[in-house]
Amino acid sequence: MKHHLASLVAAATLALAQPAGAAAEVWASARVTLGVGVSEGSQRGLAFAPGLSAGVKLYLPTDHDRAWWLNPDLGVAWTRGYAFGDSTVGAVGVGVGHQWGATALSWQPRALYGARGDGAEVWGVRNGLRVGLVAGLLDVEVSHQFLRAADGDAHEVLFSVGADIGQLAHLLTRLGPAPRPDPSQRPSTPRQLAR
């Protein structure tokens, strides 16, 4: 297992490697996240917080294995388990980040709009700090979310782990098929060497 993970990291880093001055690239992004939320204030509680998002990553290479990137995306996020009710919100945002080989750091601001389980309309903002691992295939995010409803405001801290299936698909297509051995380049056998 350890060997396979190391191979994946090496392959992903090679796929991201670009010569200096390379052109910008657009990659698909389709993230699935699982997390937990903690709410403070008069409506404190703990909640399960899954989410889905789709968008693109615009890579702007700066060096061999480094790049700045923008990540506009649309998504939906749920919180289940708070004392004041579950919520479902749509999210739209544009993240900005920097990638160093297989590691990245980004700021992910988002505008939110949706509803709680009791039907109350909510809107707000979420600001997240995301650390990307394995060339963006996996990530860990800590974010602060503010939601406003007619009956009051809620501040939440969310901790999530995500996987980017779109990034995986792009990296696999970028790696291409495995090289096939050339039959004319067979290794020498002792019998061939004796001739």
Image (cartoon, helix red, strand yellow):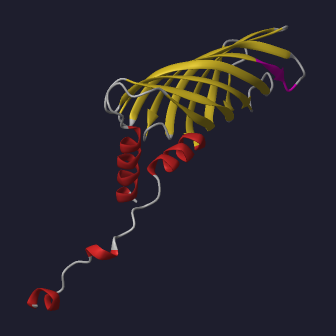
Residue 47 in view in this figure: yes
Residue at 54% x, 40% y is 167
The quarter of the image holding the C terminus is bottom left
Residue 49 in view in this figure: no
Residue at 53% x, 24% y is 142
Residue at 37% x, 41% y is 13
Q: Pick whichever, 192 or 100, lies toward us.
A: 192
Residue at 33% x, 76% y is 183
In the rendered view, tell whether residue 164 sits above or below residue 191: above
> Residue 115: within the magenta?
yes
Of all residues, the one furthest to the left in this rendering is 194
Q: Which residues are magenta?
A: 113-117
- Place of residue 52 in the rendered image (x, y in percent of width and height, measured from the top left): 68, 35
- Place of residue 42 in the rendered image (x, y in percent of width and height, measured from the top left): 71, 12
- Place of residue 96 in the rendered image (x, y in percent of width and height, measured from the top left): 51, 19
- Place of residue 185 in the rendered image (x, y in percent of width and height, measured from the top left): 26, 73
Q: Pick whichever, 45 or 35, lies toward us.
A: 35
Q: Is residue 178 left or right of residue 70?
A: left
